[in-house]
Image (cartoon, rainbow, N blue to C red):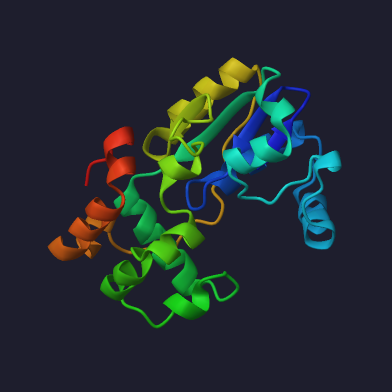
Amino acid sequence: MLISHRKRFIFFHLPKAAGSSVEAALRRFSHIPSSRLYNYMIDYLGDQKFLNLYERHVRPRDLKAIKPSLFSNGYLKFAVVRNSWDWHFSQYNFHKNSHWTIFHAEIRELNFSEYVDWATREKNMRRANSRQKEYLSDSKGNLLVDRVLRFESLSKDFDALCGELNVSATLPKINRSARSVDYRDAYSATDRNKIQATHSEDIDYFGFEF
């Protein structure tokens, strides 16, 4: 997550949706402009609302409960979402090939079909925050962000956002998952349907297509 009091915006960082790139592009407008310092403070201090210091993937509803004033003072709140099937293929490759990640030990020996079985269990969907509409909404399903950028059209969407915020920024490419095939080629019909069934709210609400 990124907060800018100077430019009055809050970016909510969903996993595997170009969040690291957005943070890098906009970090200099943040109240803590050094990502190294921010991560150091999180590691050693934890969440500290009086410092506007929050866990990287904090959900909007949790931030609102901690500091409701951020939702009533005109800050522009936004996030990036990603096609559910592509999201899972990226998640699989990232955690399988990165030994330092939180799910590496559970995923490293799985093939993609086995990963889909693992990833569509209720417990693991919650742990991974893979249901994006739920992540961005309150307990009644109301979206808590003002703008939703699309991973698939991120360059265009980000440029429009920068215009709205009156900032100049360029997106770098960070934490890209290693992959050699299109995500569509990785799915069997069964696995495709499992994602459809467990992520139907995201697919319907955001209009994702396989």
Q: Is residue 30 left or right of residue 133?
A: right
Residue at the extreme front of the image, as rendered: 140
Q: What residue is shown at x 21% (from left), y 63% (from top)?
A: 191
Q: Give the x, y percent position of residue 57.
A: 61, 50
Camera sees residue 182: no
Q: Is residue 171 left or right of residue 200?
A: right
Check the picture and name the quadrant holding the N terminus. top right
Q: Give the x, y percent position of residue 145.
A: 53, 29
Q: What residue is shown at x 73% (from left), y 35% (from top)?
A: 67
Q: Is residue 124 above or below residue 83?
A: below
Q: What residue is shown at x 50% (from left), y 26% (from top)?
A: 147
Q: Give the x, y percent position of residue 138.
A: 51, 36
Q: Is residue 164 above or below residue 66?
A: above
Q: Picture quarter containing residue 66?
A: top right
Q: Give the x, y percent position of residue 209.
A: 23, 41
Q: Is residue 48 left or right of residue 150?
A: right
